[in-house]
Image (cartoon, rainbow, N blue to C red):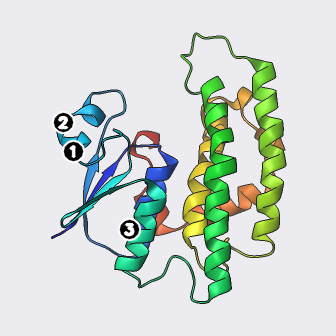
Amino acid sequence: MAITFYYGSGSPFAWKVWLVLEHKGLTYDFKRLQFDKTELKSDAFLAINPRGKVPALVDGDLALYESAAIVEYLEERYPEPTILGTDLETRARTRRIAVEAEAYLQPLQRELFTHTLFKSASDARDLEAIARCHNALLAELAHFERALGEGRYFGGLTPSLADFAVFPVLRGVRRVDDREPANGLGDAMPAWVRAYLARMESLAMVQKTWPPHWR
């Protein structure tokens, strides 16, 4: 029975799972749910995820939610190709970076969205709050610069779970520049981030999984 993947466009957690599915070359049935409709609160979806959030995944008799649990399940159930690496130290480091992206970087991305993209065009922007978000993001990005080092990807020569967790969040930060240049990081965005985003965006799996409403 094919995997069914429940997705919301723009969610970094859902994008992470989608990238893992593509990296592993798995066959899946894609179900996009709209945030601005009642699909997330329908009885059918709440039977899969009672929290009413994406991502969620059904594989045979298993219904699973929470992106970290989903990607760990996919790695154990479909171990080749790996998303973690082959040796213990690499796997531990990859997991750590993925956790850091969710625990430290994503909340700052969401806060920036709260003050920019989540407001209507007619709403005034709190420039002081946006500046605080920028400063916090730049400080946090320094940790990820150290983690990347001289590598092409956080996992080394090839993308890994670390990249699938970090990239969607970083690209979300960059989207503020795309939509509201005056309120984005702009020239303050570190050069390594711009180069890393370009490398990731050149990958076929990233283009295939690009958030539909961003196209």
Of mark 1 and mark 3, the one earlier in the sequence is 3
- The kind of secondary structure element at disc 3 is helix
Q: Residues within 10 Å of mark 3 (few under 14, many from 20)?
A: many
Residue 6 is situated, as x and y percent measured from the top left of the image, at 30, 50
In the displayed structure image, the side of residue 14 where residue 49 appears, left or right: left
- The kind of secondary structure element at disc 2 is helix
Mark in front: 3 vs 2: 2
Residue that carries the numbered disc 3 in the rendered image: 21
Residue type, label 3:
Leu
Q: Residue at x 18, y 36 (%)?
A: 43
Residue that carries the numbered disc 2 in the rendered image: 43
Residue 13 is situated, as x and y percent measured from the top left of the image, at 49, 51
Residue that carries the numbered disc 1 in the rendered image: 47
Residue type, label 1:
Ala
Residue 205 is situated, as x and y percent measured from the top left of the image, at 45, 66
Q: Front-most of 53 and 176?
A: 53
CA separation, marks 2 and 1? 6 Å
